[in-house]
Image (spheres, rainbow, N blue to C red):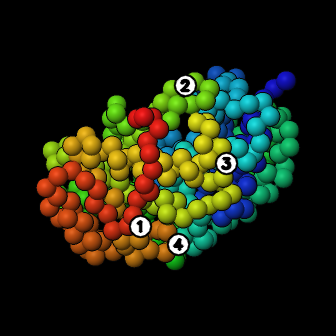
Amino acid sequence: MDSQLPLRILEASGLLHRLGYLGLRVLPGINASGTAWRIIIFNVIEWNAEDKFGDPHNASESCVYTTAGVNVFNNDVQFPEDVSHVGVAEAILESMPSLQRSTPGETGNLDYVRWYAQLLSQVTRLDELPVAYADYFDDSEGWELGWGSDRRFPAPPRYLPEPDAPLVPAKAGHRDEHYVLDLCAEVLGMSCAGQQTFDWLRGEPSLKSGKRKALPVDGYFEALGLVVEYHERQHSESVPFFDNKMTSTGMLRGAQRKLYDARKAALIPQHGLTLLVIDYRDFCHKKGKIVRDPARDREIVAALLARAAECSDPGVVTNFPVPLAETPAER
């Protein structure tokens, strides 16, 4: 039996829209050889206006799938045959931490959300999977529902930010985490290594593979022995619908996030580095997103960096408490 995962992915995207994750978009198509359907899921805050599809393949965060991989999602998530759309939605949020609940004005994506609901109502079988692009494909008449079917559906509305978008609009690859790290680099006068990993900082073992993935840190200034983590809203507020779901390690998603935050707070200083945790609550914010004022925000970041520089011994610098827990992988 053919995998039903493509349908579950499309349904999961609709579910996330209904739950308030209004920045989500999808781009489905056919591979170059014409043998597989594929899709990429991305956040509209990374939209690149120079590409008519928003250039999602160069986004810093995305989820990908191809029917050639059967039940493998985003390259390394092996789903069971009976995975639900809720399980897929959890995996999307796990891979895209910048995707947060938002208002229509914060994303400018409401017309797309409405359009997508209509599209989803027309796709109930595998032979109706939408196609936005393919080699030698004429997209002037919209998307095709079912490769080779000639059944067309209007193309999605063009993305235009709403007037009440943030003061400094997010640009491709420049979500709040990047904005804060760029401010740090500007204040310090040196470049920042993003998503740095260390062999001594790893997650819990996967129940299926037994492998322990390295836990990346948001920013690393090697010359200063300084690690910077930016905590978005999910680090301090629970989202029960998703936090109470099981991850590949056998832990609840919310509990795993707290464990990993605590593990970083414990192990980073143990290895001679200072950890600076910058929280969204350090800034003027709206629904968890920074209302950007570069001059004001630079002063906030500079004050936090000055506190970190005053530490005589490696430790944790933050205005808000980080979770305290044991680190099972180190026991």
- In the image, what residue occupies the spot 42% across and 50% down? 262
Judging by the rendered image, the residue that carries numbered circle 2 is 210
* Residue 194: image location, x then y, percent: 33, 45
Judging by the rendered image, the residue that carries numbered circle 1 is 280
- Type of amino acid at the residue the image marks with label 1: Tyr
Question: Mark 3 or mark 2, which has the lower sequence index?
Answer: 2
Crowding near pointer 3: few (<14 within 10 Å), some, many (20+)?
Answer: some
- Type of amino acid at the residue the image marks with label 4: Lys
19 and 58: which is toward the camera = 19
Q: Are marks 4 and 2 in contact (CB under 8 Å)?
A: no
Q: Nearer the viewer, mark 4 or mark 2?
A: 2
- In the image, what residue occupies the spot 17% across and 58% down? 311
Callout 3: helix, strand or loop?
A: loop
Callout 1: helix, strand or loop?
A: helix
Judging by the rendered image, the residue that carries numbered circle 3 is 245
- Type of amino acid at the residue the image marks with label 2: Gly
Q: Position of 327 compared to 221: left or right?
A: right
Judging by the rendered image, the residue that carries numbered circle 4 is 287
* Residue 318: image location, x then y, percent: 32, 63
